Image: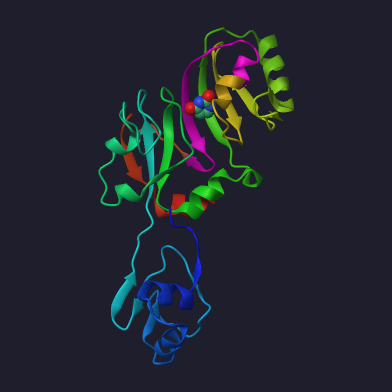
Amino acid sequence: MPSVSHRLDRFISRRLSVTNKAVRELLVRKKIIVDGEVASLMNQTVGPFTFVVVDGEVIQQRQPVYLMMNKPKGVVSATKDDKHTIVLDLIDHPLKEELHIAGRLDFNTTGLLLLTNDGAWSKQLSLPENNIMKKYRVTLKDHLFSSDVLIYQKKFSEGVFLSSENITTRPATLLALSSNIVELSICEGRYHQVKRMFGFFQNEVLELHRLSVGSLEMEGGLALGRYRVLTPKEIDKSP
Ligand code: URA
């Protein structure tokens, strides 16, 4: 997951095993091209997807990849599992081996799953201070009366204490779609968080489907188990 940026001189000297002095000479001779422009600064930043050519040789050429999948049930959100099908098994992409998951879903949770090779992007999605809302459609075992909905809404806006982490969940919103189907929006992604929040009321989650992550929405056209590349507009709107 290369997401770190480097200084141009250090990047080239490490890649080519040459001294800093040699890099400086290449720079002076205008032999270093960064993203199509002749480089002029030794300390300019090289990110994981910066295109770097030195003396006609391509030193780095990596394409960022951003995918959304409609995760089906019974598939593990991992890049390795000895027993079960993993989400990468459903992907046929030349850079598949570089991908990691940006925000896992449980084995039987369905819906929007993001995969990328851009570590900086997935980090932004997960940072608590970025307040990225994740919206879930939740099917509950126990049906709710309107009075229950108000009680759930109050509790979720105040937060549910999770004893194993010793934290209280951040304010979440609940919208009842029917007596046992609700939409829950949370801005964290703690282990089994949605199930544990409803667990506070001893109400079992029967079905869980992620509808959105920030501005990225799971549209109806993407069948379970299918994936697609994010559009440039979607990437622009995401963090
Ligand atoms: N919360 C859960 O309990 N499970 C998920 O898969 C996602 C959020």
For residue 90, what is the image quadrant? Answer: top left
Numbered disc total: 0
The relative height of residue 87 versus residue 164 in the rendered view (above or below) is: below
Assess whether residue 204 is covered by the magenta stretch: yes
Would residue 126 appear left or right of 153 to someone viewing this image?
A: left
Q: Which residues are magenta?
A: 197-216
Q: Residue at x 42, y 90 (%)?
A: 25
**Does residue 62 appear in this view?**
yes
Assess whether residue 16 is covered by the magenta stretch: no
For residue 32, what is the image quadrant? Answer: bottom left
User: Could you tell me residue 148's position as x and y percent?
Assistant: 67, 11
User: Could you tell me residue 176's position as x and y percent?
Assistant: 59, 18
Q: Residue at x 36, y 86 (%)?
A: 31
The relative height of residue 27 versus residue 188 in the rendered view (above or below) is: below
The relative height of residue 162 versus residue 133 in the rendered view (above or below) is: above
Relative depth, front residue between 91 and 25: 25
User: Could you tell me residue 208's position as x and y percent?
Assistant: 48, 22
Relative depth, front residue between 141 and 103: 103
**Does residue 183 appear in this view?**
no
Would residue 114 appear left or right of 199 to someone viewing this image?
A: left
